[in-house]
Every structure is written in structure tokens, then in C-alpha cells.
Amino acid sequence: MLFVTVAFSMVYSAAVVIFARPLASLFSDNEKVTEIAVSTCIVFHLFFGLFGVQSFVTAMLQSFGRARLSAIVSLARQGYLFIPAVLLFPMVAGFNGLLASQAIAELGAGMIALFVMFHQFGELRRALRHRGSRAIGIAG
């Protein structure tokens, strides 16, 4: 599941970046609007490949019955990381700050998801090791 979600996110992101100009041209003939749309598409999809990790981690945590932790990971991207970024960065850097706010929130959410994923994998390994040593102790 992790491979599929990350691969899909990366392919989608690459397609949007590669075809940003033709896509934007579908909606406007104005060159200035097209330029803004192209740069917006590119910046918004810089770290979109991490969305696959976030989706995987959210589903994994839900399947483990870790609803609160799943909510923390899920709400990062468009919630508690994005809202402050979209309010703060435009004041500091204008329109570029507005564009950067999505990319920064996406990167932060991806980093949180990766941290939680590796932590959960570590807990699983420890639990499996503990269960295995208990089974050996019982049998021996």
C-alpha cells in the first residue's frame, strides 16, 4: 500500500508539473494568469509525493485503532500546519509566501507522517520480537 500510494502521488505530481502550462492554458488565454497558474501548480506539487506517505500512515493508524494519532497526521496538511503558514507567510513574503505556505505545510505533514510511520514500524518490530521470544520461552 505504501509503494502504491507514494508512486501514485509522485506520478500525479510529476504529471501536473510537466503539463502545468497546457493545463493552465485550458482555463485562460491571458499570459499573466497562465504564468501565475503554472508557478502555483509547480509549487503546490513540490512535496505532493509525501501525500502518499500521509495517506498510508493515516490508514495504517486507523487499522491499528490509533484514531487520535491518525487525526494528528491527517489534520497536519490542511489544518494545523497550513492555517498558520497561510496566515503568516503572505505577510512576510507576499504572494510568494502564499504559494510557499502550501509547500511548507505539505513538507511538514510529510515529515510528521514519516516520523510516525517509522516509529510505528519500530513498535511493531519490538512487539513481534517480544511475542517471538515469549513463544520460544513457552516452547522451551
Image: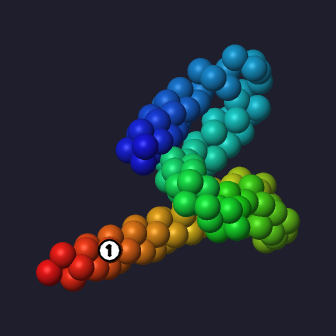
| Residue 52 visible, this orientation | yes
Of residues 49 and 121, the one nearer the viewer is 121
Q: Residue furthest left?
A: 140
Q: In the figure, 131 relative to 60: above or below?
A: below
Label 1 sits on a secondary structure element that is helix
Name the residue: 52% across, 69% down: 116
Of residues 29 and 4, the one nearer the viewer is 4
Q: As shown in the figure, which amino acid type bears the numbered disc 1?
A: Arg
Name the residue: 63% across, 47% down: 44
| Residue 101 visible, this orientation | no
Horizontal and vertical percent position of residue 135: 25, 74
Q: In the figure, 111 relative to 6: above or below?
A: below
Q: Residue 98's quadrant in the figure?
A: bottom right
Q: In the figure, 106 relative to 22: above or below?
A: below
Of residues 43 and 83, the one nearer the viewer is 83
Name the residue: 41% across, 39% down: 4
Name the residue: 77% across, 67% down: 80
Where the N terminus falls, by quadrant? top left
Q: Which residue is mark 1?
A: 131
Horizontal and vertical percent position of residue 73: 64, 63
